[in-house]
Image: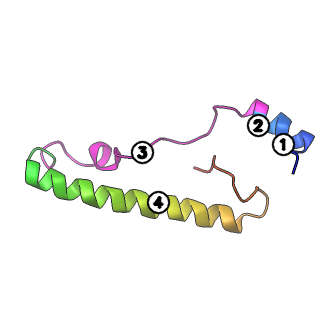
Amino acid sequence: MADSLYDVANNRLTRGQNTGFDYQGKIFQRTLSPFIMSEDKRAGILTSFETMIYFLVEKVKYIKTFYNYTVPKDYKNLN
């Protein structure tokens, strides 16, 4: 299916803007104290938790896109 002229113009104007923060692998690094991440054993456990939290956040973004009828189903620029 071809894109409409509105979609092409909108994507051209908003390219690179409001795409959100790429937080994969950086969630705990930016939110927790460096003291907590200093121990290797604890940092390994938190890294495995971080992958689960990233997965959950991505699924919430998918649900938000699914129930928002004003954007296409494969819209990726949702914060």
Label annotation for residue 57: 4
Q: Amino acid at mark 1?
A: Asp
Q: Which residues are magenta?
A: 12-36
Label annotation for residue 23: 3
Q: Please say if the residues under marks 3 and 4 sit with CB atoms less than 8 Å apart.
A: yes
Comparing 50 with 33, the one in front is 50
Q: Amino acid at mark 2?
A: Asn
Q: Amino acid at mark 4?
A: Val
| Left or right relative to 15: residue 42 | left
Residue 25 position, x and y percent, is 34, 46
| Secondary structure under the numbered disc 3 in the rendered image | loop
Residue drawn 16% across and 51% down?
Answer: 43
Q: Earlier in the sequence, mark 4 or mark 2?
A: 2
Label annotation for residue 63: none
- Give how far apart the Cα atoms at labels 4 and 2 are: 24 Å
Q: Is residue 46 magenta?
A: no
Residue 30 position, x and y percent, is 31, 43
Q: Earlier in the sequence, mark 1 or mark 4?
A: 1
| Secondary structure under the numbered disc 2 in the rendered image | helix
- Give how far apart the Cα atoms at labels 1 and 2 are: 6 Å
- Give how far apart the Cα atoms at labels 3 and 4 are: 10 Å
Which residue is denoted by mark 1 in the rendering?
7
Q: Against 39, is 64 above or below?
A: below
Q: Earlier in the sequence, mark 1 or mark 3?
A: 1
Q: Please say if the residues under marks 1 and 2 sit with CB atoms less than 8 Å apart.
A: yes
Q: Please say if the residues under marks 4 and 2 sit with CB atoms less than 8 Å apart.
A: no
Q: Amino acid at mark 3?
A: Tyr
| Secondary structure under the numbered disc 4 in the rendered image | helix
Label annotation for residue 11: 2
| Secondary structure under the numbered disc 1 in the rendered image | helix
